[in-house]
Amino acid sequence: MDNSETSASVSEIDLKRIEKALESTPTVAYTAPHDYPHGAPMFQSSPCAERERVDADQMRLYIHIPFCNYACSFCCYAKRVGANVEQKTRYVQALKKELEWVEPGTPLSQFFMGGGTPTALPPELLDEVLEAIVSRMPYSGDGVHTVETSPESITGEHLRVLKNRDVGRVSMGIQSMQEEVLDTVRRGHGQETALDACQEIIDAGFILNIDLMYGLPGQEEDTFYRDFELAARQGVHAVTAYNLRLNEYTAVARTIDEHDRFDLARLVRWRRFVCATANEFGYTQTRWHTFKKMDSIAARHQRLPVSGEDLRGYQLGIGMSARSSLGHVVYRNHKGLNTYMERVESGQSPVEEQITLREDDLKTQYIARTLGDGNSLSFDDYEATFGTPFTADFRDTLQRLQYAGLVEDDSRGMSLTNTGKLVYDLVTLSFYPEHAKQWLLERMPDYQLLEGAAQTAQMTTH
Ligand SMILES: C[S@@+](CC[C@H](N)C(=O)[O-])C[C@H]1O[C@@H](n2cnc3c(N)ncnc32)[C@H](O)[C@@H]1O
Ligand code: SF4
């Protein structure tokens, strides 16, 4: 997804037109909307449902480690702060037991261990989980495995464990390098700890991705620029830059100033700035919000898809709140730490909710992934996959988005324009099926991302 021409070729972005094109879509930011169906998590309660076994040559694995050393004011991930070693040990035993669901010897294409903060586990416990994975699921192919971390939790011993278990990529949350911003959002580390941790991870030979955020309270473009500059100087291989998503359960949503909230103009301005900054430091936008140094080892990492060509999922998610995508069903484990552990310990399924994807959901998922990965969507491939022409399914949406300059198409396919790439997630919302839009409208009135955007006319380049 190369957006390097954005600032050169777009001299004026017509926000009124974009807003009009997107107006029939719910403008919520429940979760990153390009990640469907999680952007509209229409789960049905299904306590202890057994997960369908899929016939797959290889599986992907997601492992959720909920422990954190502090609670950031913006974070709505399933996490637990202040757990002691006994609780962490018990959780690791539950993970190992849940992993027994997998047939021994099933090849593993790629795993992602996220959270929470996996390195909030002591190194021995982290190793115990990894050992359980490799002894049950032999690594196959050349997928690069990732473990998430935070600057103050990662130690040399953690890195040795990860190296020994063939983890290739570490993704570290930093969010900001400015002490005032870090304090405001209640991070438990400062700039120096973050930069030292980057150095240690790079020196140990891992691909290093860091997460930065924009739109945090008190954050300005020039401070974000300095964050990026520091990361680039440190030799960070990839940067994932997230705009702040406000979730009603977070402290920041209750305290953020009105003028710090995103409207369309502010979101577009920030994203253009982020792209320009990343390009200036030699990073290329590869997908969604990720920028990579393509001349570094980061080029080796590719996130393997959750589902195959047949659109059937083959990802198992283990741990509290983890999601599995198996066949055409998405399952979510119970979000409570104790309930999760009790269920697994007593031999029950930890699943709490599920969604069965219908054909219109699969279409949205297909479009979201294709565009999100920076690819153009081939009309022939779409028709071959779903048996109906793309234009028969989405003629009106396509016309609206074209009119607003967000997508371009020729007789063969459709792709995002450079302006479209700035609002890739909102464009994806336009392709949501009616039942998902309805679900969002009914439940998420407080998440109006475009709030206030109506007053905005045109935005000129600066
Ligand atoms: C599980 S955390 C990463 C690892 C580690 N827990 C940490 O924060 O250092 C995943 C990432 O999600 C992003 N994130 C969390 N809450 C967010 C929000 N409300 N809006 C946007 N991004 C968010 C942050 O960039 C964070 O680094
Ligand atoms: S952003 Fe990371 S460290 Fe902060 S609370 Fe969320 S998961 Fe924990």
Image (tube, rainbow, N blue to C red):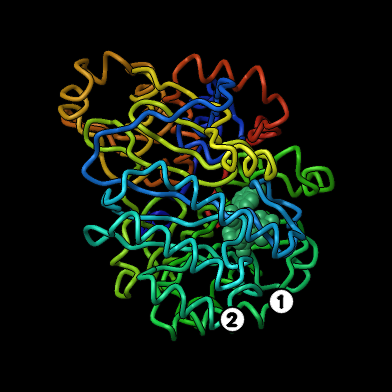
Q: Looking at the picture, does residue 200 appear above or below residue 302?
A: below
Q: How many marks?
A: 2
For disc 1, the neighbor class at 10 Å (few under 14, some 14 to 19, many from 20) is some
Q: Name the residue at the right extreme.
A: 255
Q: Which residue is mark 1?
A: 190
* Mark nearer the N terminus (2 vs 1): 1
Residue 13 screen position, x and y as percent: 49, 42
Q: Which residue lies at the image location 28% right of the left edge and 31% below the top edge? A: 311
As measured in the structure, the alpha-carbon distance from the residue carrying label 2 to the one carrying label 1 is 9 Å
Whether residue 281 is visible: no
Disc 2, SS: helix
Q: Looking at numbered disc 1 in the image, what kind of residue is underneath it?
A: Gly
Q: Which residue is mark 2?
A: 195
Disc 1, SS: loop
Q: Looking at the picture, does residue 164 appear above or below residue 418?
A: below
Q: Quadrant of residue 238?
A: bottom left
Residue 258 screen position, x and y as percent: 80, 43
